[in-house]
Image (cartoon, rainbow, N blue to C red):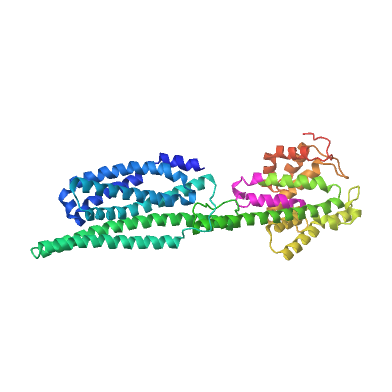
Amino acid sequence: MQMDIKESSGRETSARAAVHYLLTALILSIYGGQVCPYIEGLGVGHWLVVLVSFFGAAMLLRVMLIRWLLPRAGYERMAGRQFLIELSVFLAASLAITLFNIVMYDFPFGSGMKIILGSASLGFFAAGDMALERERRIYGHFARSGLSIVPKKKYFSLTSRFLVLSTALIGIITAVVFLVISKDMEWLAAIGQSDPRGAQLAVLGELGFIGAVVLLGTINLTRSYARNLRLYLDNENSSLMAVSRGELTKQAVVSTNDEFGVMAHYTNRMIKELRLRIEEIQKTQDAAIISLAALAEIRDIETGMHILRTKLYVKALAEKMSTMPAYMDELRPETIELMHKSAPLHDIGKVGIPDAVLLKPARLTPEEYDVMKMHPVYGGDSLSEAEEALGESSFLNLARQIAYTHHEKWDGSGYPKGLKGREIPLAGRLMALADVYDALVFKRVYKPALPHEEAKRLIVEDRGRHFDPDVVDAFLSIEDQFLGIVAEHSGGEHDGMRV
C-alpha cells in the first residue's frame, strides 16, 4: 500500500503546484518593487526573469523532494510533511534569489529579507493548499482500498490547526504591511510635499495590492480546508445514515490522525459491535425457530423434511416475485430472508392438536378435520402472544402471518378467517402454494405421492381460486427449482419423482 502512494507521488503532474509557483513569481515581481527600491531599480521585466528562473529550478527540486521524502512518512504524517517540503522549497528559492542579488547587484541584506518574507508568505498559502490536497489524495486512496489508519492518541487537533493558521495569517499581514508602509514612509520623506495626492493614491494602491493578494490566498486556503471538512463530514454522515437504514457493512474511511479520524475509527468499531450483536441475536432467533419447529416435528413425523422444503420453496417464490415491478418494494432481500426463516413455523399450531387427530393413519372425518383446522389459530395466537411479550418484531410478525393465513384461499373459501385476495398477507399466499405443492408430491397416510406434472396441473387449475395468480405464475417460471429442492431434500420420503 505504501508503494501505491510512492508511485502516485512520482506520477503526479504537479499542475496545482506549478500554478502556485507561477503566481508567486508574478506577485513577487510586483511586490519586490513596492517594498524595495533596489529591486524597483532593476525593472519589472528583468526582475521577473530572475524570479521565473529560480522558481522554475525550485519546481524541479520540489519534485525530487516529494518523490524522495514523502513516501517515507506514515499516512498520518504525509500531509504535514508535504507542507514542510513545500514551504522549505519556497524559502530555499527566496534564499537563493537573495544571495544572487547580493552577489550580482550588491543588494543590502535587508532587501533580501523583504523577498524572503514575501516568498515565505506566499509559500505558506501554497504549502497549506498542497497539504490539504494531499489529505484528499490520501482519503481517496483509503476509500478505494477499503483500508484504514489507526489514529494515535496524540494528534495535532483541528482547533490547534485553526489557531496556528489564524496566527500565521495575522503575522503575515502585519509583517508585509509593515514593510510596505516602512518603504512608503521613506519614499514620502524623500519627495516631500511635491505631490501629496499622487503619493496618497500610490500608497493606497500598494496596500490594496497586498490586501488583495492576502485575501485571495486566504480564500483559497479556506476553501480548500472547507472542502476537506465537507469530505470528512459527508464520510461520517453517510456511514451513520447507512447504520440508520440497517446497513452494517459500510465502513467510514479513516485517513487522518485528528478528530475526524478518531470519530471515523470509533464509528467503525460501533458498526462492528452492532453487527456482532445482531448476528448473535439472529443466531438466537434461528435457534428459537429450530427449537419451535422441532416441537412440531416431534408431534408429526411428516413435518420434519416438509418444514425444510417449504421454506426453500417460499424463498424461491419470493425471490422470483421480487423481480416483478408490483412486488419490488415489498420483497426486499431482508424481507425475503425473514420469510425464509419464519416459514418453518407455519405448522407450529399442530402442537395443540390431539394425537388421535394429528397422528391418525387414515383420512380424517369431517369432525376431526374441524379440529385439525384449528392449528393455524393455535400457531398464530401463540406467536401473537410472543410478539406482545417481546415487542414488535418483523420476524414474529411474518411468522404470525404465515401461521394464521397459510390455509386461506384467494377466493375466500379458506380458513380460519375466510380472507380473500390481497386481504391475505403475501407471506401467507406464498406459503399456501408451497405447502400444497409439497403435500401433493409426497406420500401421506391418506394419499400416494403425485408426479410433479400432475401437482402442477392441479395448482394451475386452482389459479385464482385457491392460489394467488401471481404466485402461480412465479411457480411456473421456476418449477425447475422446485424439482431441485425435492430431489435434494426428499429425506427418504420420495423414491424419485416422475415428471
Say above or below: 117 vs 433. Answer: below
Front-lying residue, 190 or 399: 190
Say whether residue 335 is magenta: yes
Residue stretch rendered in magenta on the structure: 319-344
Q: Is residue 414 visible?
A: no
Image coordinates of residue 313 in percent, x first then y, are 73, 44
- Judged left or right of residue 147, residue 339 is right
The image quarter in which residue 418 lies:
bottom right
Q: Is residue 212 visible?
A: yes
Q: Residue at x 23, y 56 (%)?
A: 110
- Judged left or right of residue 425, residue 119 is left
Q: How many marks?
A: 0
Q: Residue at x 37, y 58 (%)?
A: 222
Front-lying residue, 177 or 340: 177
Say above or below: 176 vs 75. Answer: below
Front-lying residue, 327 or 410: 327
Image coordinates of residue 23 in percent, x first then y, are 28, 49
The image quarter in which residue 454 lies:
top right
Q: Residue at x 64, y 54 (%)?
A: 275
Q: Quadrant of the C terminus?
A: top right
- Judged left or right of residue 306, residue 201 is left
Residue closest to the far left: 194
Image coordinates of residue 179 in percent, x first then y, are 23, 60
Magenta segment main secondary structure: helix
Image coordinates of residue 117 in percent, x first then y, are 28, 55
Say whether residue 105 is magenta: no
- Judged left or right of residue 36, residue 442 is right
